[in-house]
Image (cartoon, rainbow, N blue to C red):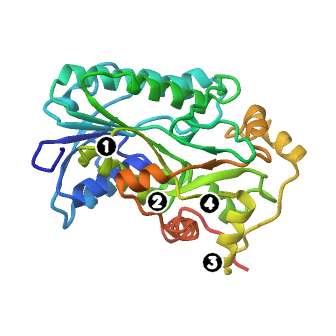
């Protein structure tokens, strides 16, 4: 069992959307946290993380770590009793998917595992995977579980799903170390810094900003970042935790999510129409966040996942999706990261 008294816990990707909230919860529970960041001396960029220590029993230090640099995690992991590996490239499409999406996941995970081996003190690894490692192209009527793998995902058709699947399989094959793998769905909730608005919260940013005239016919599973962070800590501290856990509250079509947001925030002009499929394919040719293959995988395809194992095995209670969307939107607006048009 990992406790605050056991020793330091290293968190890779500590400045990321999920990683920042994991750091927050660990500090609240009294852990000694080593936040792995590219530049520990960039105090301005890290100020929001440092502020999380105020009034909390845990302590925080910043240690250098770079996914693509072998040996860069050695100092952070030396003497650590656990590693929470959240770092990855959260990009669905890129001109060079091998370099921009796959390498950070695969090479980065190998570098993390090698550093853990060299440290010799790490007892548990909590690895942030994704539901994209479970399902790449949803099938009507099917509910996906932890037993499923997105074997249909390839470098060409779904580089993100391919990368997450192969990275998770690397950690699943580890012996001599307790490994827990978490598979969050699309993560929303309060953002702490402007950079977080470019992660999955960018979907809410687009809705508030009116970036698109209508919404794609995509069905997405949704989860709150606060539940994701709690799941990471529960996976760390529960001695019986093992294997993989889907972390997801519920699923909904993009149009329905936009309607939830529009009803909760009537002061803003939030578009709730459905985008025709052919327009979406055209948009995929110009929007760097999408690809034609991605549209083909998602368009008009439901995506349902079973979260029961996370409820019973990690004790996670999920808040309503509406609350998650609204809290995400308000954090973007209140911090000035987006300026939506008022009615």
Which image quadrant is residue 250 in? Answer: bottom right
* Circle number at residue 224: none
Is residue 192 in view? no
Is residue 238 in view? yes
First reached walking from the N terminus: tag 2 or tag 1: 2
Nearer to the camera, 120 or 327: 120
Mark 4 element type = helix
Q: Quadrant of the N terminus?
A: top left
* Circle number at residue 204: 4
Seen in the image, is 286 located left or right of residue 238?
right
First reached walking from the N terminus: tag 4 or tag 3: 4
* Circle number at residue 264: 3
How far is mark 2 from mark 1, CA to CA? 28 Å
Q: Please report the residue visible at 56 percent of the width from the left and 67 percent of the height from the top.
A: 329
Q: Which is in the foreground here, disc 3 or disc 2?
A: 3
Q: Quadrant of the C terminus?
A: bottom right
Could you tell me if the residues under marks 3 and 2 are in contact, i.e. CB atoms within 8 Å? no
Seen in the image, is 263 located left or right of residue 195?
right
First reached walking from the N terminus: tag 3 or tag 2: 2
Packing grade of label 1 (10 A; few <14, some 14-19, many >=20) is some
Q: Please report the residue visible at 25 percent of the width from the left and 53 percent of the height from the top.
A: 26
How far is mark 1 from mark 3, CA to CA? 37 Å
* Image: 325 above or below 150: below
Q: Which is in the foreground here, disc 1 or disc 3?
A: 1
Q: Please report the residue visible at 54 percent of the width from the left and 48 percent of the height from the top.
A: 185
Whole-percent x, y for residue 193 in the image: 43, 56
* Circle number at residue 241: 1
Packing grade of label 2 (10 A; few <14, some 14-19, many >=20) is many
First reached walking from the N terminus: tag 4 or tag 2: 2
């Amino acid at each position: 069992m990992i406790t605050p008294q056991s020793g330091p816990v290293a968190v890779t990707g500590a400045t990321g959307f999920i990683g920042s909230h994991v750091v927050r919860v660990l500090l609240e529970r009294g852990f000694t946290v080593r936040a792995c960041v590219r530049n520990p001396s960039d105090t301005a960029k890290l100020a929001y993380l440092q502020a999380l220590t105020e009034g909390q029993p845990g302590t925080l230090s910043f240690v250098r770590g770079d996914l693509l640099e072998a040996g860069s995690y050695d100092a952070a992991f030396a003497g650590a009793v656990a590693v929470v590996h959240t770092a990855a490239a959260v990009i669905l499409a890129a001109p060079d998917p091998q370099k921009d999406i796959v390498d950070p996941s695969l090479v980065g995970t190998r570098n993390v595992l090698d550093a853990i081996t060299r440290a010799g003190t790490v007892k548990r690894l909590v690895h942030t995977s994704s539901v994209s490692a479970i399902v790449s192209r949803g099938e009507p009527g099917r509910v996906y579980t932890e037993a499923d793998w997105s074997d249909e995902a390839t470098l060409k058709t779904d580089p993100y799903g391919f990368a997450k699947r192969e990275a998770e399989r690397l950690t699943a094959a580890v012996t001599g170390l307790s490994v827990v793998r978490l598979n969050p769905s699309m993560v929303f909730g309060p953002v702490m810094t402007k950079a977080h608005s470019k992660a999955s919260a960018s979907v809410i940013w687009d809705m508030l900003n009116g970036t698109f005239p209508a919404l794609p016919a995509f069905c997405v599973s949704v989860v709150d970042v606060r539940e994701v962070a709690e799941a990471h800590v529960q996976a760390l501290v529960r001695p019986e935790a093992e294997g993989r856990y889907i972390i997801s509250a519920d699923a909904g079509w993009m149009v329905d999510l936009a309607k939830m947001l529009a009803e909760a925030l009537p002061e803003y002009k939030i578009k709730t129409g459905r985008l025709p499929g052919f327009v979406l394919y055209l948009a995929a040719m110009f929007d760097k966040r999408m690809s034609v293959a991605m549209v083909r995988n998602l368009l008009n395809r439901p995506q349902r996942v079973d979260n029961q194992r996370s409820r019973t095995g990690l004790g996670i209670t999920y808040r309503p999706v509406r609350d998650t969307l609204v809290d995400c939107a308000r954090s973007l607006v209140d911090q000035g990261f987006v300026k939506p048009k008022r009615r």
